[in-house]
Amino acid sequence: MYGRWILLFVLGVIAVLMASPLILTVFTSLKPTTELVNPAWYPPLNVTFEHYVRVWTEGGFSRYFFNTLLISVVDAAVMVVIASLAAYAMVFIDFRGKLALQVLFLIGLMIPVTAIVLPLFQIVRSFGLLNTHFGVIVADLALAVSVFVFMFTSYFVGVPKALHEAARIDGATEFQIYRRVIMPIAMPAVVTTALLEFLWSWNDLLLRLLLLTQDEMRTLSVGLLNFQGTMTRDVTGLSSGTVIMAIPVVILFLFFQRHFVRGMTAGAVK
Amino acid sequence: MFLDPDSKWAQRLNPVLFLLPALTIYIVFAIYPTISVVEYSFTDWDGISPNRKYIGLANYERLFTDKIFWEAFRNTFVWSGVIIVINVGLGLVIAAMLARVWKARLLIQTCIVLPVVISPMAVATIWRWMYQPTGVINQLLESIGLGGLATPWLGSPDVVLYALALAHSWSTIGLSVIIFLAGLQAVDEDLYEAAKVDGATPVQAFRYVTLPALRPVTAVVFILTLTQSFKVFDLVWATTKGGPIRFSEILSTYMYKRGALENQYGYGSAIGVSLLVIVSAATIIYMQIQNKEDR
């Protein structure tokens, strides 16, 4: 049975090809400038971190990094709260107009961010939120909230209604049930939501390009874009910057691969 | 919390309180701009001045005669087509191979899916570097004696769109593979056994058992890839900005140039509306296919 081995070999080649752009970028970021004459697939002979130090301090990437981290963490945390609250009402509380609300949230799945950035910019500006992280955060939340409302809704639908009923009979308020009964068993949905929203927020360029024009407010995506524009020939600097931007999400992915895979297939419409 | 939970007021207030945060943000920063983009598209607004004039369908009439718009329109479809061929075709083949392998499966799968989490901005930086005239791709071609094929990938009009599509596919194909893999796991094992008994080769089994069983999943991946690729802005903007000249101009970059950089807000919004219509139509089809599958 050579078939299996041929299959494994072909897949191995594909895996190496898929991984190589990232590996080559890491190689380049660790090479002393003198080794850049070697072909790109030569591993660094004398590993150096000078390029990382350079972009982190002089290149301003430390500021970009913490700006991005702040926005992404707040995005993820607030998203978990507002999306789960809304989904709780949609599933466990009876009220009029539920169907209309469902349709309204459904529309959100269809809106491509790209198409509405022009008026979005105007609205953020009219609230005086241009060049603030708060402005980026609310825009992020608004544009992704329907995905996560549906994610929590489909999770809550699977929770036995009797659990909710029993807590009501014991005299608990809806908010108490939400906090003490439902949320503790919704941890898979919480983790998926937090990871996915963190990822989307971390990676986005377009909204940040429009809404953050002052350098000290900028995120890694905008920082890298500007760095690329002014330092076209700084190959080592650019690759270190790229690695700095990729490392946190790669680590998260390796630790939570299962959650990511489930979340990305479920939230794929966005 | 301060009210008696069974009082009429609490009953009425509860859903409002639970929904208020999400709904407020959503309506103000997502629904309102969506309505606005349609409204702007009927005006001559420059994005700055306090007054704007309604000019009816003038922006849309201009769209129809705007050569650059149609170039961007065509490019967007070509770009999407290339990505669909790669992500659906190759994605399916890779998933089918992965499904038959146990050794090292997680490692291989990780290598294929990992690029999905990489930011389009980082993808742009990496591929721009690899595509340079002296970059790794040309180095590689020369080292294996195919130096004649070396070209400035992002600088040549005939190649740039395909080169960028390849970069986008690299960073998204992992998602197709995952969805196909999930679909493959749902295919009835007995069908393969029956095919084996009937003397079918693995290729025949793939052709006559796997492919028909995967038709709904394939439709999902198809539409998903279509909508995702139509929305792309970051990757193209961070590599070529639509160039050289306009050979990689797609709808989103053209809209950004007109609307955000040249202050033609009304016209840019009309381009945005065309994007909105195409993507929402595709999404509605996508959701209907998924609904059918869930049942």
Image (cartoon, rainbow, N blue to C red):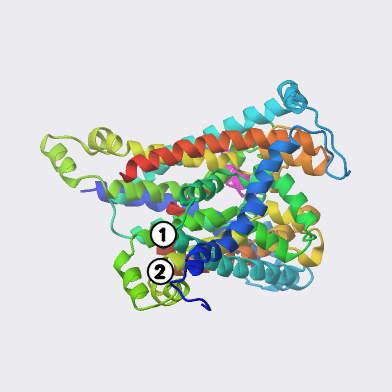
Q: Mark 1 lies on which chain?
A: A
Measured in 3D between alpha carbons, the distance from the residue under mark 2 to the one under mark 1, in whole angstroms, is 13 Å
**Res B145 seen here:** no
Q: What stretch is highlighted in magenta?
A: B132-146
Q: Observer-nearest residue: B6 or B132?
A: B6
In the rendered image, which residue does mark 1 sit on? A91
Asked if residue A23 lies left or right of residue A118, the reply is left
The C terminus of chain B sits in image quarter: top left
Asked if residue A50 lies left or right of residue A90, the reply is right
Q: Are marks 2 and 1 in contact (CB under 8 Å)?
A: no
Identified by mark 2, the residue type is Ala
**Point 55% across, 38% down: residue:** B280
Is A87 one of the magenta-colored residues?
Answer: no
Task: Tell me where residue A235 sits by quadrant.
Answer: bottom right
Q: Mark 2 lies on which chain?
A: A
Where residue B282 appears, x then y in whole percent? 51, 36
Mark 1: secondary structure: helix
Q: For residue A186, which numbered disc appears in the image?
A: 2
In the displayed orientation, state which residue is furthest to the top.
Answer: B65
Compared with residue A101, is residue B77 higher up or lower down, i.e. above or below?
above
